[in-house]
Amino acid sequence: MLEAVKNYKSYFTKKFACAAIEELIEVFEVTTEISDKLYSKLICCFWDLGEIILNLKKLERARDWKSWKSAAEELDRLEGKEPWKKREQSPLYDYILLRRRLKLIRNLRQRNDMNALVHYLRSGLVRGLGGSLNPSLYSKSLTDTKYLIMEYQDEVCSALKHILNSPDYPLKSKLTFFSDSRYSFGKTAFLMSGGGGLGIYHLGVVKALYEQDLLPKIIAGTSAGSMVAAFIGTTKWEEIPKWFEKGTIKYDDQSGLEGGPWIKKIKRLFNDGYLMDIKYLERFLRNTLGEITFEEAYEKTGTVLNITVSESSDYSDYRLLNYLTAPQVLVWSAVLASCAIPYIFESVELECKNHMGEIVPYHPSGLKFIDGSIKADLPTQKIAELFNVNAFIVSQTNPWIVPLLTPEDGGGSWGDTFNYKLFRLLKRMLLMEFQHRVQQLNVLNLCNTLSWWLGIFTQQYRGHVTIWPIPSIKDYVNILSNPTDDDIQRCIRKGQVRTFPKINMLKSIMAIEKTFDSCFQEIRERMHLKPVKIVESLEGEEEFEEIMEN
């Protein structure tokens, strides 16, 4: 009996031990499975983080749009931006309005109801309809925005091309529609600020826009920006890439723009009131640009070149020089005046060609001009009035403005954090407060002697899209020195990289405008009319009446 009890006890002890071991094994397996999953997630997390860092470096080192876009698309994928792009709903724009117009335009186009389609397009063709150009919509993704916005723009462009190619709509009616609608939609201009040596960064922005076919035909430049604007505005469209090549821009080998040793400069400042001898800059500009006037440049290129200058008097406004306001003025003399920074260069007279082709002073009275950025770094108002511009792309390189600029889009998801928004708000408030105090001093006439310089801080320095560099300490140190060929190439590359994140929004701004331009030119070709420049619609009322009669 006792033996039986011992055997029974031994049996249950072994049974319990086996069960306990089985439980431990099961717990271990579950723990191992959880550990494996956690390990896998950690590996994926660190792998994605590594991939993100790798692609961020690729963005910084990109030398062309293709390589930059490839890295940007991979970043969007890693950060899971696709659901946001597909989701139409957002408080940032009127998605209901866009969806409704999209469906109606598509329906009218598919039904080939031309009169209704033309009427409906004209009733709502405005740039940025429903807030679709809100900068925040272009900050979430590096390469795209909401698919609804892109789909709407594509549908409008398709509808315009449908009207162009429809045999059911009279040719004269097409000409009227495209001429009027193109004008009412408005145009885009590209403005380049001053900035001394930092102005070389403008070339990188120009290159990025040119290669993406996003460089407007209306360009303007002030101070250092006027130099780059003149390079582009006096060159035929297909020849513009030469300015991006190494060695094209040739400064004086000895003193160039610098005007001699520093001891000589200091003496000149105390004796004559300016630091550098402007004759070296004049020689460089004349050798580079030649004796071409604004009117000749426009006839040669079709590009509307604008250069801003300021009168040396305290009581005068700035002047915008172009083929309409100053057709006979020599471009190099306008650039020279626009670069004449007070106390750095002496003020200069403008030169022009008279009816005999001789070079003479533009103002017989000897009126002199100085740096255009003193009173209008970005002459948006006058350009809007003259050329029907309602969208401005700005390349900003002013050394005292660049540090104050805060990107609306934040350059990525970090721009949506509370700390960043607070930092951006504080910077904006400080700048606005300073501008307000300066305006008060001007109103009270308490700073007449400093009005030139204080006016710098009360201007508008942004456009609808603003692009600016991140200068190095070396850039600031050499801001009044000639850049070397290597410096120019470095600035071009950095200027490109700073422009690439804006390409997405720029395409949205210009897509419909570019379609209007191409359709309008094609209609004129079909009617055997001569092509027109970008700022013209019809060659006057007489031509329009002649077309209607025939």
Image (tube, rainbow, N blue to C red):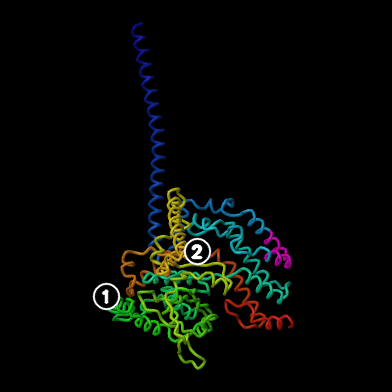
* Front in this rendered view, residue 384 or 242: 384
Q: Where does the image place residue 424, in percent across and percent down from the top left?
A: 44, 54
Tell me which numbered mark, 2 or 1, is placed earlier along the sequence.
Answer: 1
Q: Residue at x 60, y 74 (%)?
A: 518
* Front in this rendered view, residue 448 or 102: 448
State whether residue 142 is above or below residue 189.
above
Distance of label 2 from label 1 (alpha carbons) = 39 Å
Circle 1 is placed at which residue position? 262
Quadrant (top left/top right/bottom left/bottom right) for the C terminus: bottom right
Quadrant (top left/top right/bottom left/bottom right) for the N terminus: top left
User: How many C-alpha atoms fall within 10 Å of the one at disc 1: few (<14), some, or many (≥20)?
Assistant: few
Q: Which mark is nearer the camera, 2 or 1?
A: 1
Q: How many marks?
A: 2
Q: Indicate yes or no whether the magenta region holds residue 111.
A: yes
Q: Where does the image place residue 472, in percent across and percent down from the top left?
A: 34, 64
Q: Is residue 445 left or right of residue 514?
A: left
Q: For residue 348, what is the image quadrant?
A: bottom left
- Residue that sits furthest to the bottom in the current view: 356
User: How many C-alpha atoms fall within 10 Å of the one at disc 2: few (<14), some, or many (≥20)?
Assistant: many
Write the start and end of the magenta stretch as one range.
Answer: 104-121
Circle 2 is placed at which residue position? 465
State whether residue 92 is above or below residue 176.
above
Q: Main secondary structure of the magenta part?
A: helix
Q: For residue 250, what is the image quadrant?
A: bottom left
* Front in this rendered view, residue 313 or 153: 313
Residue type at mark 1: give it: Trp
Q: Indicate yes or no whether the magenta region holds residue 436.
A: no
Q: Are marks 2 and 1 in contact (CB under 8 Å)?
A: no
- Residue that sits furthest to the left in the current view: 263
Q: Where does the image place residue 206, in percent across and percent down from the top left?
A: 45, 71
Q: Where does the image place residue 405, in percent across and percent down from the top left?
A: 43, 60
Residue 225: which numbered mark, if any? Answer: none
